[in-house]
Image: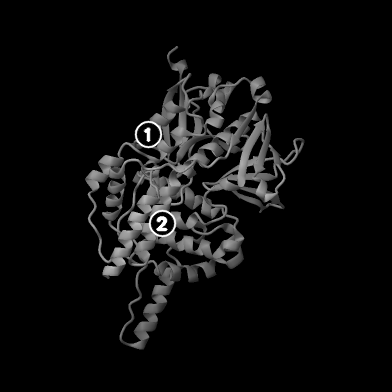
Amino acid sequence: MRAKQKQQVCILLPNKQHLDCTVRMRARGREVLNSVLKLLSISDLQVFGLAVLKDNEYLFLDPEQKLSKYFSKRWSRGSLMVPFILFLRVQYYVESGQLILSSKVLQLYYTELRQKVLRSQSRHQEALLFQLAATALQAEVGDLEQRDGGDEEEEEEEEEKRQERKHRHYFLPEDYFPSWLIKCRGREYLLQHSPLLHGELRGVSRSQAILQFIREASCLQDGPLTFYRMKQEKKELKCSILLGVTLKGVHIYQEVEGKQCLLYDLTWTNIDRFTFQGCRFEIHAVGSLCLPKLLYYTHSAFHSKHVLRHLSDSHRLHINTREAVSYIQQLEDMQACQFYKEAYICDTARLRQRLHCNSLTSSMSDCSVAVETITHAWTKEEEEMTEIEMCVDEPEEVLVDNPAEVSWLAELLRGVSVDGCMVLPPSCWAAVTMEMKQVLQRRADEEVSVD
């Protein structure tokens, strides 16, 4: 009897490994999440979520919903011999890898993003794909060996030929380039020219290369986003519309003869609201764009509810992390322009103590109230009849009332080594205002005047 009250769940990871856990029949998504945290020996999944493959697309689990809601009747009929499959996937993409605190989570994030790049169809961004391949090689292979010429011409030519043969065969193009690019350029072309770009990254450490790859991949049009398939007409047999959820908004594609054509690139500020009723999904742009209401159809009300939840959470994450991203970018710009001529020592113990209780997922705790009702368990009739609307409103700027907190943040930024990894969770930046920006700018000006 006790055996029948348990179910076996297999979680597939981005690195092609898997985790196995046994849960109760009445278990909710939160129980599996806790098991994953324990098995990976981490405290927070941050940008990751658990997804189920339903109607040939991934839907992210609501942690408070029962697993039986996602596996339907199969859950009650299942056995311990045949596990149910869940996927650990990136749910929220970030502009900077320095926002991810855990090294294990960062590695998983990089691994999934690498696979997304290999599936990219952005044919107009070929140069970026070459650069991403070089950065990935630096992260995974390390420095390319330098070619050491001899004193005599014959030895020099022989050494160059030997090194060229070695360099051209130290990687497989299929592991670093999309298939269409290999077909277009040819394997020999990629093997010949990629080492040149790879060699330019000599001296970049593995961790720096991973962060650089994440930063560069954020510029890839169809890279850091999650696709949901939709129909233009309710009675269509095939889904021809792809709704891509990004950190900064949504992309809407249409599949034409197997190719993805971008129809709309809407940032959060371009969107007034999302509305769904049953499988009917509407996107209302702000009036200044003069765009008609975009109407599409999902597989079901169940899909619509989860897509709306993902949109809401992504929008909230964008709001809560944009200050952090802005200041990380400022620090990187300062480093590139050599505003600081020396590396400062940061009190890492103090930094860890102040930021330990915060993480990227803490930003998800205050998701939009407008979609709070979608977390409740609905009957099928309620799902079909209820209309849910999510308004995309930008919050007003929060003023800083505590000067001591401003001085601490300014002091903290002052003490960050320009050679190290800037790791700050988004919640630390929620109260940063123009006053702090002036403090940073004034100190930067003082550094320039001293030099």
Q: Quadrant of residue 232?
A: top right
The numbered mark, 1 or 2, whose residue comes first in the sequence reads 1
Where does residue 184 sit, x and y in percent of width and height? 61, 65
Kindly give the residue lying farthest to the top in the view shown. Answer: 1
Outermost residue, right direction?
Answer: 235
State the residue position of label 2: 329
Residue nearest the observer in this picture, 320 or 381: 320
For residue 248, side relative to residue 142 (left or right): right
At 27% across and 47% down in the image, what residue appears? 408
- The residue to which callout 1 is attached is 37
Marks 1/2 in contact by CB < 8 Å: the verdict is no
Amino acid of disc 1: Leu
The three-letter code of the residue at mark 2 reads Gln
Q: Position of residue 136 (x, y in %)?
A: 43, 58
Q: Is residue 139 left or right of residue 26?
A: left
Residue drawn at x 68%, y 25% is: 384
Query: Looking at the image, can residue 236 be seen?
Result: yes
Q: Residue furthest bottom?
A: 152
285 vs 419, nearest the viewer: 285
> Helix, strand, or loop for circle 2?
helix
Q: CA distance from mark 1 to mark 2?
A: 30 Å
Mark 2 Cα shell of 10 Å, populated few (<14), some (14-19), many (≥20): some
